[in-house]
Image (cartoon, rainbow, N blue to C red):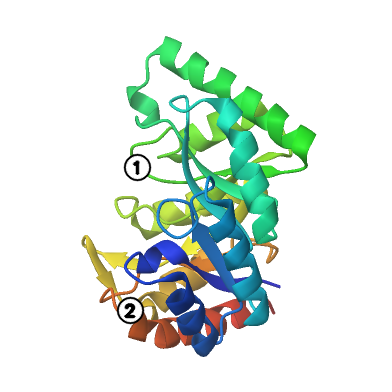
């Protein structure tokens, strides 16, 4: 059955305690902590505080949302990120793969990123972690072709994918993307964009019912972005997400 939560980067301006409070009040149980603002991996004291505070609130961390970029950052840094993730209570980390779209890469650039990804996967295997690539524009995995190229080239159970709809892909294109990448997908980022603007998730229920039908229910579904950027909207968005998850899990 799908599990639901939220990403802390939806609320970069809020404190850790405020993110925890709004999440608990919304009825969600999970927070993916971002490494950019709330949970820098080098700040062990803060990481330990988050782990304690979320536990006391009855919440947990399903994944660590890092901004580590394969091909641009030193893979040895992953040891520190993995250590932080484990303190938070998870062995799953979100990474980015480069900063250029798949079709824009030269053959040499592609080979370098594949090589770095294999090094990262080996580190993850040795440390019992799972590295999941962000499905996003301006990265190797901006398209289905790029994501499949990466997954098949690295070929490791410790190297997986996140999925989220591409705002330029159209519903049919996104359904095909979700269906094909689903076997590699650990987590889904959930939001509703239309014509480049954020809208309440309720407006996109029909589309999301089709997307979720592509997955086996083992994934975490994490809200990303509020339609009005307000934490007060989390409760309504969470209600819609939980209803979607419940229907899709039957």
Say left or right for 60 vs 95. right
Q: Is residue 86 above or below residue 243?
A: above
Question: Which of these two is toward me, 62 or 219?
Answer: 62
What residue is rendered at 42% in x and 39% in y? Answer: 143
What residue is rendered at 52% in x and 37% in y? Answer: 147
Q: Quadrant of the C terminus?
A: bottom right
Q: Is residue 31 above or below residue 57?
A: above
Question: Which of these two is toward me, 42 or 88?
Answer: 42
Numbered badge on residue 137: 1
Residue 18, percent across and down? 43, 78
What residue is rendered at 33% in x and 37% in y? Answer: 138
Q: Secondary structure at mark 2?
A: loop
Q: Residues within 10 Å of mark 1 (few under 14, many from 20)?
A: some
**Residue ID for mark 2:** 200
Q: Secondary structure at mark 1?
A: loop
Residue 38, percent across and down? 45, 60
What residue is rendered at 34% in x and 50% in y? Answer: 169
Q: Residues within 10 Å of mark 2 (few under 14, many from 20)?
A: some
């Amino acid at each position: 059955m799908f599990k639901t939560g939220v990403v802390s980067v939806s609320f970069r301006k809020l404190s850790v305690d405020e993110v925890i409070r709004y999440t608990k009040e919304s009825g969600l149980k999970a927070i993916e902590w971002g490494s950019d603002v709330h949970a820098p991996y080098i700040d062990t004291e803060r990481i330990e505080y988050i782990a304690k505070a979320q536990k006391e609130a009855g919440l947990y961390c399903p994944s660590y949302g890092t901004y580590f970029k394969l091909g641009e950052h030193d893979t040895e840094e992953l040891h520190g990120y993995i250590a932080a993730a484990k303190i938070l209570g998870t062995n799953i980390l979100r990474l980015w793969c480069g900063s250029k779209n798949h079709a824009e890469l030269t053959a040499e650039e592609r080979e370098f990123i594949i090589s770095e990804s294999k090094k990262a996967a080996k580190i993850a295997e040795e440390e019992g972690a799972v590295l999941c690539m962000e499905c996003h524009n301006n990265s190797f995995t901006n398209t289905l072709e790029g994501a499949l190229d990466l997954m098949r080239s690295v070929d490791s159970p410790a190297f997986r994918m996140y999925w989220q709809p591409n705002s330029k892909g159209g519903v049919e294109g996104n359904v095909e993307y979700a269906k094909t990448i689903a076997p590699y997908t650990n987590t889904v980022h959930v939001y509703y964009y239309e014509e480049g603007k954020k809208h309440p998730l309720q407006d996109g229920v029909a589309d999301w019912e089709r997307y979720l039908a592509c997955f086996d229910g083992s994934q975490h579904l994490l809200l990303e972005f509020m339609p009005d950027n307000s934490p007060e909207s989390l409760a309504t968005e969470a209600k819609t997400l939980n209803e979607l998850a419940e229907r899709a899990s039957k």
